[in-house]
């Protein structure tokens, strides 16, 4: 199965083409969210470099969030346009799931991974996964909470359900809030910086795994978890 994977949820714009789990091409650009200018040329270059076209693609995977509201809209709109034009199946993968797949080959089955993304002001997005048979099962659904609330939720869940299990942390939140995490989970495991960056390869592999479960196409909707800042500011003014 040839897969086009589009990652636009963070400051990095990333495009990959995979055949099942094998990477045929990948490119990433980190230039402060100018995805509207870069995404289509990057996709065109991916096709040129692999001697493929949209007609060869059998699945399109995109990041549905949480993340940059603008970046998500660009990636999702582009994916929907391709799928509508060519009737290619598409699947959406959350940023948090994609991060878990960054470390798929670095942990053993039955290990637990918390994906955590900073969303400013001591708040974060997080979700908890368990590796099972080369895929991830979700234990705690994606949420937006303060870091303290996040850690309290994780601690309560682990004490009740995952006694004596170590927990791995991945994502930029694992770097920013490392001290807070270690104060709650003294034996927490962390990964080096490159594993904490969202990328289209892990996203594509997650999409492939999802398709193997029989989910070959779905309506792609953004997973914001938090309201856009402009909407929050408007609501605050209305309540004054």
Image: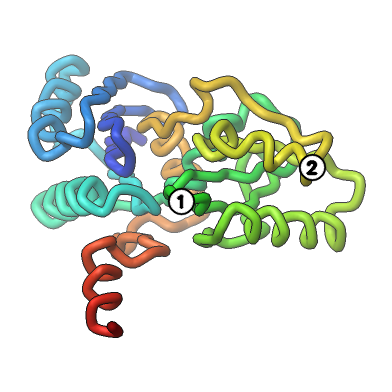
In the displayed structure, does residue 214 sit left or right of residue 169?
Answer: left
Q: CA distance from mark 1 to mark 2?
A: 22 Å
Seen in the picture, residue 226 relative to 5 is either above or below; the reply is below
Question: Is residue 230 at all visible to an observer of this figure?
Answer: yes
* Quarter occupied by the N terminus: top left
Question: Is residue 59 at all visible to an observer of this figure?
Answer: no
- What residue is drawn where x is 52% and y is 36%? 171
Say whether disc 1 or disc 2 marks the residue closer to the N-terminus. 1
Task: Residue lying at the far bottom in this picture: please name it.
Answer: 239
Residue tagged by mark 2?
Answer: 185
In the displayed structure, does residue 166 sit left or right of residue 129?
Answer: right
Numbered disc in front, either 1 or 2: 1
- What residue is drawn where x is 70% and y is 41%? 181
Q: Where is residue 23? Give x, y as percent.
A: 39, 21
- What residue is drawn where x is 65% and y is 37%? 169
In the displayed structure, does residue 133 sit left or right of residue 66?
Answer: right
Residue 63 or residue 1, whichever sits in front: 63
Seen in the picture, residue 131 relative to 12 is either above or below; the reply is below
Residue 64 or residue 173, whichever sits in front: 173
Q: Where is residue 43? Give x, y as percent.
A: 16, 30
Residue 115, quarter of the rendered image = top right
Residue 189 or residue 89, whichever sits in front: 189
- Describe the element under mark 2 as helix, strand or loop: loop
Residue 186, quarter of the rendered image = top right
Seen in the picture, residue 127 relative to 6 is either above or below; the reply is below
Q: Where is residue 118? Give x, y as percent.
A: 47, 44
Residue 107, quarter of the rendered image = top right
Disc count in the image? Answer: 2
- What residue is drawn where x is 9% and y is 27%? 41
* Quarter occupied by the C terminus: bottom left
- Describe the element under mark 1 as helix, strand or loop: loop
Residue tagged by mark 1?
Answer: 121
């Amino acid at each position: 199965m040839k897969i086009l994977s589009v990652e636009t949820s963070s400051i990095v714009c990333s495009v990959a083409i995979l055949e099942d789990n094998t990477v045929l091409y990948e490119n990433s650009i980190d230039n402060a969210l100018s995805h509207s200018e870069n995404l289509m040329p990057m996709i065109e270059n991916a096709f040129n470099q692999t001697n493929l076209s949209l007609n060869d693609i059998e699945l399109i995977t995109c990041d549905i969030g949480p993340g940059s509201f603008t970046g998500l809209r660009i990636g999702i709109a582009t994916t929907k346009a391709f799928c509508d034009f060519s009737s290619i199946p598409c699947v959406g993968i959350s940023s948090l799931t994609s991060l878990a797949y960054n470390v798929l080959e670095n942990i053993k089955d039955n290990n637990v991974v918390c994906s955590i993304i900073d969303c400013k002001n001591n708040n974060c997005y997080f979700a908890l996964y368990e590796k099972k048979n080369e895929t991830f099962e979700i234990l705690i659904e994606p949420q937006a909470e303060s870091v303290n609330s996040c850690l309290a939720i994780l601690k309560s869940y682990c004490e009740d359900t995952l006694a004596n299990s170590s927990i791995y942390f991945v994502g930029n939140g694992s770097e920013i809030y490392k001290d807070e995490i270690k104060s709650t989970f003294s034996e927490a495991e962390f990964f080096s910086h490159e594993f904490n960056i969202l990328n289209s390869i892990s996203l594509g592999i997650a999409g492939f795994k999802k398709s193997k479960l029989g989910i070959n196409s779905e309506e792609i909707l953004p997973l914001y978890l938090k309201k856009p800042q402009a909407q929050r500011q408007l609501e605050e003014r209305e309540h004054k």
